[in-house]
Amino acid sequence: MIIFVSRHPVPLLRMSWEGLYVALSRVKYRDHIRLAVNRDTLEKEKEAMEYMVELKKNKYTDSFFRGFKSIGADGVVETQSQVMTWDRKAAWKAAGFDKLAKDTPKVKKTSNKARKKRTMTDIQNAMKRKKRRI
């Protein structure tokens, strides 16, 4: 995998943290990664490496990764070699959805028995009625 490290002059074409993560996650062995760096001057090479260090996760990616917890962890930071498990509630809380759920009123659901099942004929008739209105 060849990764072009330099900051691209067009913002749309710049590498994001998520793009780098996807690229690196597709490689099985570290020896299969190559960095393409502008080495015209030492300054350009240094600038390219600083750009990679400055990459930050967006808030949604960060919330997703906060949902992973080490198995057997009780709030203690463990080594990175631990087996991780997905905790939906932790990601939900990291994204702030727990506060949002408390603020919005609950919508009352109707039971399945109360709902009329729509057939294909019902859908076709509804479409015909819409066409007549236009």
Image (cartoon, rainbow, N blue to C red):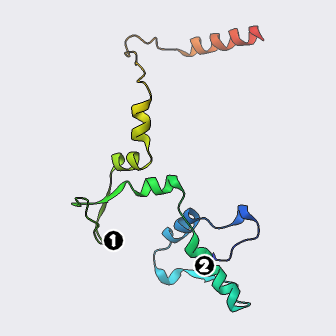
Query: In the rendering, at what x and y percent does residue 8 appear?
Result: 72, 71
- Who's the residue at 57% across and 11% down the image? 122
Quick one: label 1 or label 2, which is nearer the N terminus? 2
Name the foreground residue: 26 vs 64.
64
User: Left or right: where does residue 4 sit relative to residue 97?
Assistant: right
Secondary structure at badge 1 equals: loop
**Quadrant in which residue 108 is drawn:** top left
Q: Quadrant of residue 49?
A: bottom right
Q: Is residue 55 left or right of residue 40?
A: left
Instruction: Say which quadrant the C terminus sits in.
Output: top right
Q: Label 2 belongs to which residue?
A: 50
Amino acid type, residue under disc 1 in the picture: Gln
* Residue 47 location (% of width, % of height): 66, 81
Q: Is residue 53 above or below residue 22?
A: below
Residue 124 vs 16, above or below: the answer is above
Question: Residue 82 appears in which quarter of the rendering?
Answer: bottom left
Q: Is residue 131 above or below residue 104?
A: above
Which is more foreground, mark 1 or mark 2? 2
Q: Which mark is residue 80?
A: 1
Residue at 43% from the left image edge and 31% from the top image edge: 103
Q: Residues within 10 Å of mark 1 (few under 14, many from 20)?
A: few
Q: In the rendered view, does 66 fall on the left or right side of 84?
A: right
Instruction: Give the percent coordinates (x, y) of residue 2.
Output: 61, 78
